[in-house]
Each structure stands twice: as structure tokens, then as C-alpha cells.
Image (tube, rainbow, N blue to C red):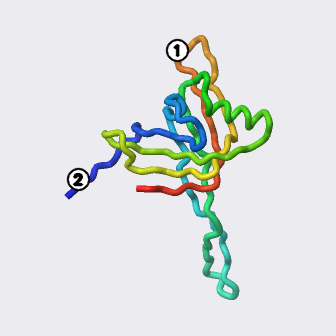
Amino acid sequence: MDTFYPPVGFHFKVEFQDLDKEDIDVRFQAVNGLTVDMQTQSVKEGGEHRFEHVLPIRTKYTNLTLKRGLTKNSKLIEWCTDTFQTLLIYPKDVLVYLLNEEHEPLMTWNIVQAWPKKWSVSDFNAEKGGLVIETLELEYQYFTIEQ
């Protein structure tokens, strides 16, 4: 019988489809936003004022946020800056892999039709010694999970 143990959250990688899989563009410090929420609508029952029904309307996916140390010569950032400068959006599918100790995928999130919504760089501060972190926020349609 296999022994189950909760996976660690620090061993993962991110791949962008149709983008060169350079080592620099698959390593991130943090991935946030793998969240789906069911939006609802409340409907009061006619004639019977004691009851209110909550009905599902649609699912809403939060933006995917990726963080890493600032990099140079990144195809990923070229894709982002091209989007912001030309306003031409070329969506890409994104794969987020949670890895085991053999560096094999335990679970995979397939983010569908992602495009850059926001890119930012952390503040520069001469009084603090820290890395410059770039943050990329992606809008997307939905995600699926493979186990």
C-alpha cells in the first residue's frame, strides 16, 4: 500500500506553452492564484418569506501571480512588454507543476489562455539589502487539474 504524505509547496516549476523553455523562465519564487470560486445569486421564495435560495451562477478564477528575482534576457518578459506596448494580446497556456522528490509532477494545473495583465518590479531601497523581485499577474479563462 502506498504511503500518503502531504506534498511540500516549495518544489514546483512553471512552463509557458509556445515559449522557449529556458531555465530562467520556469523558475519562480512564488505562484499564487490557483483559486476558483462559485458566484451565486440569492432568490427569495415567493409567497413564503422565510426562505431564501442561493443559486450557482458561474465560476470565477482569480488572477495568477508569479514572482521571481529580476531577470535579463527573458522571453517571458519580452512577451509581456510586447503585450503592454502594442496592446496585441497573444494568450498562452501555462502549466504549473507541483513536483515530488524525484522532480516528477505530482499534480499539474493547466491554465488556459493566459495573458499578461500587470508586471511590476519591487521598490529599490538603499537602506535594505534585498533582491529585486519582479511580479507578473496573468488573467486567464480557467484551469484544469491533472493528478
**Front disc: 1 or 2:** 2
Q: Amino acid at mark 1?
A: Gly
Q: Return the residue at label 1.
A: 129
Q: Return the residue at label 2.
A: 3
Depicted 85 relative to depicted 131: above or below: below
Label 1, residues with CA under 10 Å away: few <14, some 14-19, many ≥20: few
As drawn, is 137 to the left or to the right of 30? right
- Which is nearer the eye, 117 or 91? 91
Tell me the residue at 70%/85% (across/down): 46
As drawn, the residue found furthest toward the bottom would be: 47
Residue 134 appears at what percent x and percent y? 60, 28
Image quadrant in which the N terminus is located: bottom left
As drawn, the residue found furthest toward the top would be: 126
Tell me the residue at 61%/73% (across/down): 54
Residue 127 appears at what percent x and percent y? 58, 12
As drawn, is 23 to the left or to the right of 65? left
- Which is nearer the eye, 74 or 9? 74
Q: Secondary structure at mark 2?
A: loop
Q: Secondary structure at mark 1?
A: loop
Tell me the residue at 61%/70% (across/down): 56
- Which of the two discs, 1 and 2, labels the residue nearer the N terminus? 2
Residue 41 appears at what percent x and percent y? 66, 69
- Which is nearer the eye, 71 or 37? 71
Tell me the residue at 71%/32% (across/down): 81
Depicted 21 relative to depicted 106: above or below: above
**Cα distance in 3D space between marks 1 and 2:** 43 Å
Q: Amino acid at mark 2?
A: Thr
